Amino acid sequence: MDLVIGPLDLPAHVDEALAVQAIAFGLGPDEVAVRRQIVLRHMAHPGARAFGATVAERLVGFVYGMPNDRTHWWSTVVQPYLRAQGNEHWLDDSFVITELHVHPAHQNRGAGRALITTITDTATQPRSILSAIDTESPARALYHSLGYQDLARRVLFPSAPRPYAVMGAPLPLLRG
């Protein structure tokens, strides 16, 4: 079946998207309920946008992001880690990949790559930043292949059980 990447009205499809995230990221119902409110709040920010990956008109992956704002919670958490590595300037004039998830049955087929390159191709900022669980994983391998480099590692988010890495890449992303 053909994978289709296109703009996603995320507020209208938030439950469908979070069902994908819950499976891909192992979230329980309480975590999904919290993330639902976060996604809806994020999508109200200027410049926020989302893209979906569909197969047979069924959502199998999504990405969303927005221009970075140093007053946002994520930036306030990662800023001291970036400053310690001399990378604080990455918070300025950057497009943040807030979430990127692909249903496990559709991983390793190019959906994640297509989603992240599509959303960053629409960014006017010269660079992109994101955070990912700080382990050698297929997701981090994908980000590295696109030109993302580690800007800070062992970043601790409140209530997150595992440390994260903050990664950044100049735009446009590498193709390969």
Image: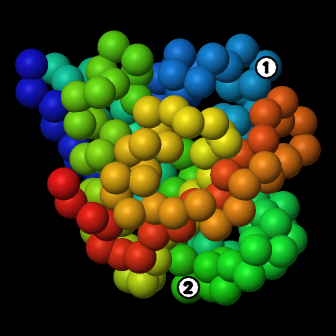
Q: In this rendered view, identify the residue nearer to me: 36 or 153.
A: 153
> x and y percent of residue 87 in the render?
69, 79
Q: Secondary structure at mark 1?
A: helix
Label 2 crowd bin: few (<14), some (14–19), many (20+), radius 10 Å: some
Is residue 40 rendered to the left or right of residue 74? left
> x and y percent of residue 69 in the render?
68, 76
Looking at the picture, does residue 55 appear above or below residue 134? above
Label 1 crowd bin: few (<14), some (14–19), many (20+), radius 10 Å: few
**Which residue appears at 33% of the width and 13% of the height?**
105
Q: Which residue is mark 1?
A: 30
> x and y percent of residue 58 in the render?
27, 21
Q: Quadrant of the N terminus?
A: top left
Q: In this rendered view, identify the residue nearer to me: 36 or 90.
A: 90
Q: Which residue is mark 2?
A: 93
Q: Tell me which corner region of the image, top left, top right, bottom left or bottom right, holds residue 34.
A: top right
Q: Secondary structure at mark 2?
A: loop
> x and y percent of residue 115 in the render?
32, 47
Q: Say whether residue 13 is visible.
A: no
